[in-house]
Image: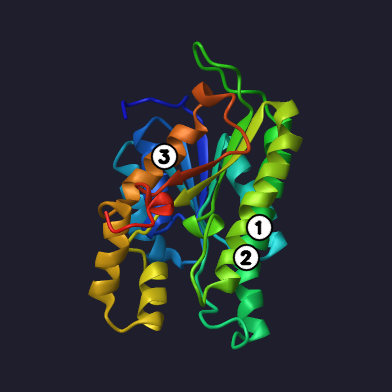
């Protein structure tokens, strides 16, 4: 992607201190964001490497410790970002967990609730307060593009389209993300705000590694099978670049969409 594919707005990324969320934040910095807000539950030391990765591109970076399952944390994080930068133009909600791995009849209700709290309610809370802020601000202008007050990209999963055994809570949470993303998209479009989802394929994240480790001790074999179906290994930066692409005002008619970034994994039921 060429430098400057988005106007110089402000990006707000949850789960942004490390891993996939930080790759999304770095993509926003590299592709033209004037400022990036990293929101995570990490302590100050946990933010250090992620903040430096963003600042490498000359982008101002604000870090905020917050728990996305707590409404006051989310509300305060939005307020702090707006105090610092004046607005939020690009929101990317990538905080999430796996958890609750087991047969439906074996999963404890408290483990189920934890997954729903983070992956569903947490993403919904962030979307709620991001949209509330975006509605109030003047739209960003980009040559040859429709003015845009804001864009929200919510992280779903290939599990929002299909599933595997022993993932009932995670699969339910990701189906929910796609569902309320579509609803919010219809509600927000009158304000020139777009809301979309992105469904990554299999990446070597701690979340996926933990799931495979719980299901089968032969981790390398499992990875080989998953990546063969996907065609190759996926990179965090590829998801980050897709999130930035989806946020661009150039895609002004793309709304309520679930962008699947999986190399064809979800349609490949063979061995090729």
Q: Is residue 238 left or right of residue 224?
A: right
> Is residue 67 visible in the rendered structure shown here?
no
Q: In the depicted view, which residue is nearer to us: 41 or 258?
A: 258
Q: Nearer the viewer, residue 53 or 147?
A: 147
The colouring scheme, among rainbow, by chain, secondary structure or one colour, is rainbow
User: Could you classify mark 3 by the number of other residues whose Cα lies within 10 Å: few (under 14), some (14-19), or many (20 or more)?
Assistant: some
Q: Which numbered disc flags the more N-terminal residue, 2 or 3?
A: 2
Residue that badge 3 annotates: 242
Residue contact at pointers 1 and 2, CB within 8 angstroms: yes
Residue appearing at x 42%, y 69% in the figure: 207
Q: Residue furthest top?
A: 144
**Closer to viewer: mark 2 or mark 3:** 2
Left or right of 207 on screen, residue 171: right
The residue under the point 37% across, 32% down is 31
Q: Residue at x 66, y 76 (%)?
A: 113
The Cα–Cα distance between marks 3 and 1, rounded to whole angstroms, is 21 Å
How far apart are labels 1 and 2 at the CA level? 6 Å
Q: Determine if residue 113 is in view.
A: yes
The image quarter in which residue 209 lies:
bottom left
Numbered disc 2: secondary structure: helix
Mark 2 Cα within 10 Å, few/some/many (few <14, many 20+)? some
Residue 258 sits in quarter: top right
Q: Mark 1 — residue? A: 176
In the rendering, at what x and y percent does residue 134 appear? 67, 35
| Mark 2 vs mark 3, CA separation in Å | 24 Å
For disc 2, the marked residue is 172
On the image, the x and y values in percent for residue 116 come to 64, 68
Q: Position of residue 42 (x, y in %)?
A: 46, 67
């Amino acid at each position: 992607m060429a430098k400057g594919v988005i106007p110089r707005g402000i990006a707000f990324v949850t789960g942004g201190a490390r891993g996939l969320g930080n790759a999304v934040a770095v993509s926003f910095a590299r592709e033209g964001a004037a400022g990036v807000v990293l929101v995570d539950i990490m302590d100050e030391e946990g933010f250090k490497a992620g903040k430096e990765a963003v600042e490498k591109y000359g982008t101002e970076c604000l870090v905020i410790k917050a728990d996305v399952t707590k409404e006051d944390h989310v509300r305060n994080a939005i307020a702090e970002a707006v105090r610092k930068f004046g607005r939020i133009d690009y929101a990317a909600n990538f905080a999430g967990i796996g958890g609750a791995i087991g047969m439906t009849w074996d999963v404890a209700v408290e483990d189920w609730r934890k997954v729903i709290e983070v992956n569903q309610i947490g993403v919904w809370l962030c979307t709620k307060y991001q949209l509330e802020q975006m509605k109030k601000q003047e739209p960003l202008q980009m040559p040859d593009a429709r003015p845009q007050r804001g864009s929200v990209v919510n992280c779903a999963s290939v599990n929002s389209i299909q599933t595997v055994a022993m993932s009932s809570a995670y699969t339910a949470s990701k189906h929910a993300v796609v569902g309320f993303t579509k609803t919010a998209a219809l509600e927000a479009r009158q304000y020139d705000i777009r809301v979309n989802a992105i469904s990554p394929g299999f990446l070597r994240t701690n979340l996926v590694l933990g799931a495979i480790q719980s299901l089968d001790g032969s981790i390398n074999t499992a990875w080989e099978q998953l990546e063969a179906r996907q065609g190759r290994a996926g990179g965090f930066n590829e998801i980050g670049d897709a999130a930035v692409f989806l946020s661009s005002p150039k895609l002004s008619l793309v709304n309520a969409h679930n962008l699947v970034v999986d190399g064809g994994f979800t349609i490949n039921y063979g061995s090729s």
